[in-house]
Amino acid sequence: MLASIRLERAARTPAAASLHERVVLVTGASGGLGRATALAAAQAGASVILLGRKPRALERVYDEIEAQGWPAPALYPLDLEGATPRDYEDLAATVEREFGRLDGIAHCAAHFNTLQPFGQIEPLEWARAQHVNVTAPLWLTQACQPLLERAADAAVVFVVDDLRRMGRAYWGAYGVAKHALLGLASIIHEETESSRLRSHLLLPMPMRTALRRAAYYGEDTAMLPEPDEAGAALAWLLGAAGIAARGRLLDLRPQA
């Protein structure tokens, strides 16, 4: 398991122009954390590729970035649930053709259905959760690996949940997937620790997102913060300063 690290907010906020001339790909870019990450990365100077399954929602994020005068983003609609390895190869080829480089991937896309007893998990729901939350990030990273390794410094960031909670009753397919994702990130780190490509994990604080609302029924999600702070931390990991957290889990949860 990757060791965790905590940093004060100021120490994990991307500096102005810290992602200048970098190209980063954000999956789930129209969702809560994905949108926040895309905006933070663009504000720091990155050319952001917005990937998601809902074109109109991606267009709204595109318009937000454009309205601020930040580097023009690109849209790449893709449904991770149905995408094949060939689709990811096509994506990598498009990025190389249009940008000539790729400096980072923020794996913000996630699939969560509901809390339920393990005996009630439908086979297709199990497969969907493992595919979107683990297999798709692997296939995407594999397809983009040659591009990432050509960069002077590249980062891949995986987003996990509180693994102590994920191992408890009723978290089912989603909980198993998040444990598997941590294992994947750890393996990638060990295989790339002497290369230009680095692997990170991000554990966000409780945030006001659709996934949080679906998982925590009795919680007043409106009282939680927007995912802006977590998005900024993820953008920081994508930059050169993030090297300080290479191969670590950046824990943003409030300390007890």
Image (cartoon, helix red, strand yellow):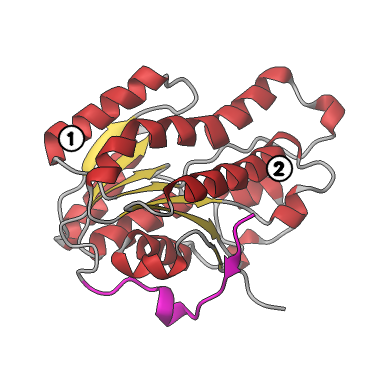
- Write the residue at 86% across / 26% down: 119
Element class at badge 2: helix
Q: Position of residue 82 (x, y in %)?
A: 46, 20
Up-down: is 130 above or below 2?
above
Up-down: is 25 above or below 240?
above
On the image, which quarter does residue 94 sit in? top left
Q: Position of residue 100 (x, y in %)?
A: 14, 40
Q: Which residue position is annotated with label 2?
A: 175
Q: Which residue position is annotated with label 1?
A: 96
Up-down: is 18 above or below 202?
below
Taking the image as shown, residue 102 lies to the left or right of residue 185, namely left
How many other residues sit within 10 Å of disc 2, few (<14), some (14-19) or many (≥20)? many
- Write the residue at 18% across / 35% down: 96
Q: Position of residue 22 (x, y in %)?
A: 21, 55
Q: How many marks?
A: 2
Q: Which span of residues is magenta-colored?
A: 1-16
Question: Mainly helix, strand or loop, the magenta region?
Answer: loop
Taking the image as shown, residue 124 lies to the left or right of residue 195, namely right
The amino acid marked with disc number 1 is Glu
User: Is 114 a magenta residue?
Assistant: no
User: Is 14 a magenta residue?
Assistant: yes
Q: Nearer the viewer, mark 2 or mark 1?
A: 1
How far separated are the C-alphas under marks 2 and 1? 35 Å
